[in-house]
Image: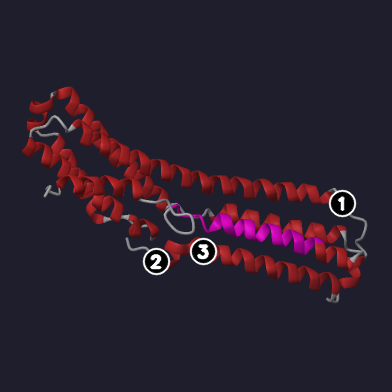
Amino acid sequence: MPVSQWQAYDHYGLALIAVLGTLVGVLLIQWFAQSSRWAGWVRSLEGVAPPFINIVGVLFALTLAFLANDTWSAHDRAMGAVYREADALRSIIALAEPLPAPLGERVRRAVGDYARVSADEWTELARRAEGAEVGRHADRLLTVLASRDVEAAVGGTVQALMLRKAADARADRDQRVALSKTHVNPLKWAGMALLGFLTLLSVAAVHVDRPRAAMVGVVLFALAAAPTAAIVLVQGNPFQQPTAVTPQPIAAVAASLRVQATPER
């Protein structure tokens, strides 16, 4: 199914909404408390104890921390999957060393083709899609390794290990594809936005009898909360900037096989 531009890059838009929404919230609270026709009634609410801020503020901080942990954990898992995939491919190459020249070349070519299309898949992962050729080359690699010629050349034990490494590479590739398609949970972020707005209200309520102190407190909280939430949001896809996971480990495998295939002069 084609992926729309919003589905592919929704977290950038949500980050912008978080910043602009916080600005609107600050202006709305200041207008409501100082300039609206209800300003007198608002000032009559003075007496809210400062520790009241902690109740809502702690809930907001915990929610944002959990969301940040989810996002950065996905980034770490994607990076780990890339390195494990590259390591599995290098293991297949090493295990294929005893193979006779024609068969060994077939295995190395299959590994190199898979590594090449896998590294080229990053542009698709950035759009929350996947490369059509990667699965086909993964099947071809498994077919080559499962041949009777490989079993006869290295034995069943080594062949089984090579097949397991190929299956591991495929599983790690499936994991990074799944992580690239992970979207921001709207309910979690809606809850965080609500708690953030309530924290702004709490800061304003505590300083309702001191307009300048209220403005400073609300603005300082907004300057801390909005950029932090935006930073977490823009990292919603591990394969997009500004902190995109690199395909370099897999590309290095493909490059090493190209060097090996280049005849010496």
What kind of residue is marked 3?
Tyr
Residue at the disc numbered 1: 50
Q: Which residue is mark 2?
A: 4
Q: Secondary structure at mark 2?
A: loop
Disc 3 or 1, which lies upstream in sequence? Answer: 3
Q: Earlier in the sequence, mark 1 or mark 2?
A: 2
Q: Which secondary structure dominates the residues rendered in magenta? A: helix
Residue 140 visible in the shown view: no
Magenta-colored stretch includes residue 235 = yes
The mark lying in front, picked from 3 and 2, is 3
- Type of the residue with mark 1: Pro
Residue 37 lies, in percent from the top left, at: 86, 76
Q: Assign the N terminus to one quadrant of the image.
A: bottom left
Q: Is residue 93 above or below residue 3?
A: above
Would you say 222 lies left or right of 121 here? right
**For residue 162, which quarter of the picture?**
top left
Measure how far apart labels 1 and 2 are at the Cα level: 46 Å
Return the mark for residue 20. none
Cα distance between the residues tagged 3 and 1: 35 Å
**Residue placed most toward the observer, 135 or 123:** 123
From the viewer's perspective, tell me whether residue 64 is left or right of residue 151.
Answer: right
Horizontally, residue 259 falls left or right of residue 4, namely left
Residue identifier under label 3? 12
The colouring scheme, among rainbow, by chain, secondary structure or one colour, is: secondary structure
The crowd level at tag 1 (other Cα within 10 Å; few <14, some 14-19, many 20+) is few
Residue 180, position as x, y percentages in the image: 41, 52
Residue at the limit of the structure toward the front, as seen here:
265
Kindly identify the residue that appears in the image at 59 percent across and 66 percent down.
17
The range drawn in magenta is 217-238
How packed mark 3 is, by other alpha carbons closer than 10 Å (few <14, some 14-19, many 20 or more), is: some
Q: CA distance from mark 3 to mark 2?
A: 14 Å
